[in-house]
């Protein structure tokens, strides 16, 4: 199994969900219990955001984590490496 999460797919997916929500990156980061720049860092600097951080962000956006994984995994229909 060669499944993996792709940082570009993560950024694109989360950015679209943020736009759909009408909220700011900062308010979502804070609402998720992260630093106020967590999403900004994800979009610009972080190459490995970590599963816990992504879980918190998806929960704050109201996205089931399984849906998130399905949409950002490369090389398989769903699942983690």
Image (cartoon, grey):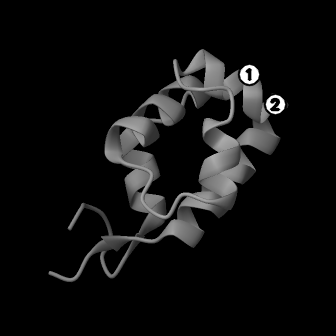
* Residue at x 81%, y 28% (from the top left corner): 23
42, 17: nearer the viewer: 42
Q: Which mark is residue 24?
A: 2
Q: Position of residue 33 (x, y in %)?
A: 52, 18
Placement of 21 over or under 43, stated as above or below = above
71, 26: nearer the viewer: 26
Placement of 14 over or under 71, stated as above or below = above
Q: Position of residue 31 (x, y in %)?
A: 61, 16
Q: Are marks 2 and 1 in contact (CB under 8 Å)?
A: yes
Number of residues whose C-alpha sits closer than 10 Å to that of mark 2, classed few (under 14), some (14–19) or many (20 or more): few
Residue linked to disc 1: 27
* Residue at x 37%, y 48% (from the top left corner): 50
Q: Position of residue 64 (x, y in %)?
A: 43, 36
Quadrant position of residue 1: bottom left
Q: Which quadrant does the C terminus fall into?
A: bottom left
Placement of 36 over or under 4, stated as above or below = above
Q: Position of residue 67 (x, y in %)?
A: 43, 48
Q: How many marks?
A: 2
Q: Which mark is residue 9?
A: none
* Residue at x 46%, y 50% (from the top left corner): 68
In this rendering, position of residue 45 left or right of residue 53: right
SS assignment at label 1: helix
SS assignment at label 2: loop
Quadrant position of residue 24: top right
* Residue at x 60%, y 37% (from the top left corner): 38
The residues bearing labels 2 and 1 have C-alpha atoms spaced at a distance of 5 Å
């Amino acid at each position: 199994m060669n499944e993996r999460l792709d940082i570009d797919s993560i950024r694109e997916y989360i950015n679209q969900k943020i736009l759909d929500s009408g909220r700011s990156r900062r308010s979502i980061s804070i609402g998720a219990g992260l630093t106020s720049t967590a999403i900004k860092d994800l979009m610009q600097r972080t190459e490995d955001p970590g599963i816990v951080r992504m879980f918190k962000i998806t929960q704050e956006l109201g996205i089931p984590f399984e849906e998130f994984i399905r949409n950002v995994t490369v090389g398989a229909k769903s699942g983690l490496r």
